[in-house]
Image: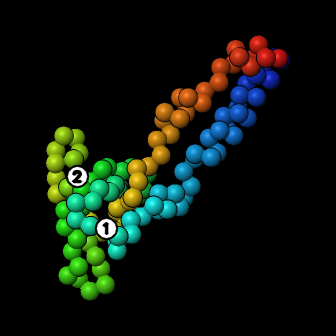
């Protein structure tokens, strides 16, 4: 019975801890770059997969293109797997900050069942 109680308490603690860092549907869109504040040479974060805005790679803005009416696009330099590439992308694929790393936070938040049992 003590083990079941410990597991129940652990489950509650884990759900409380991870509810605040669980990505929401709109998360990843809150820190889109402000195109009017970007300059050539600025650092940003490139979203290589439009289906996963939490996956980001650091990049440098090489050129800001304003030759299309009503649309701005960018030439960026990205290093991926040791290869440096230049790519053209739109503002929707650039972010101002890296995504939150939940893996390190998850490891730090683990509570042992033994500590719960010793507390009861």
Instruction: Estimate the spatial distance between the alpha carbons at disc 1 and disc 2, rounded to whole Å.
Output: 17 Å
**Residue 69 at x, y = what percent?**
26, 86
State the residue at coordinates (60%, 27%): 110
The total number of labels drawn is 2
Quadrant location of the N terminus? Answer: top right
Q: Position of residue 2 (x, y in %)?
A: 81, 17
Q: Is residue 119 left or right of residue 43?
A: right
Is residue 107 at least partly visible in the picture?
yes
What kind of element bears circle 1? Answer: loop
**From the image, which quarter does the C terminus lie in?**
top right
Judging depth in this view, the residue of 112 and 63 nearest the camera is 63
Lateral position of residue 95 relative to residue 69, left or right:
right
User: Horizontal and vertical percent for residue 109?
Assistant: 60, 30
Colour setup of the view: rainbow
- Most foreground residue, 8 or 35: 35
Q: In screen coordinates, is 85 left or right of 11?
A: left
Answer above or below: position of 16 versus 113.
below
Q: Is residue 83 above or below residue 64?
A: above
Q: Earlier in the sequence, mark 1 or mark 2?
A: 1
**Label annotation for residue 78:** 2
- In the image, what residue occupies the spot 18% across and 40% down? 82
The residue shown at (32%, 57%) is 44
Q: Residues within 10 Å of mark 1 (few under 14, many from 20)?
A: some
Q: Residues within 10 Å of mark 2 (few under 14, many from 20)?
A: many
Q: What residue lies at 79% left-to-right and 17% top-to-bottom? A: 119
The answer to which image quadrant residue 116 occupies is top right
Please tell me the numbered disc located at residue 38: 1
Find residue 50 and report its horizontal and vertical position in percent: 37, 60
């Amino acid at each position: 019975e003590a083990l079941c109680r410990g597991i129940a308490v652990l489950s509650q603690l884990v759900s409380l801890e991870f509810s605040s860092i669980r990505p929401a549907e709109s998360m990843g869109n809150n820190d889109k770059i402000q195109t009017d504040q970007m300059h050539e040479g600025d650092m940003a974060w490139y979203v290589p997969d439009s289906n996963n805005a939490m996956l980001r790679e650091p990049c440098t803005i090489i050129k800001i293109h304003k030759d299309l009416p009503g649309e701005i696009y960018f030439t960026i330099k990205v290093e991926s797997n040791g290869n440096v590439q230049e790519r053209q992308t739109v503002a929707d694929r650039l972010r101002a900050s890296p995504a939150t790393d939940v893996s390190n936070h998850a490891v730090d938040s683990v509570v042992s069942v033994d500590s719960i049992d010793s507390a009861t």
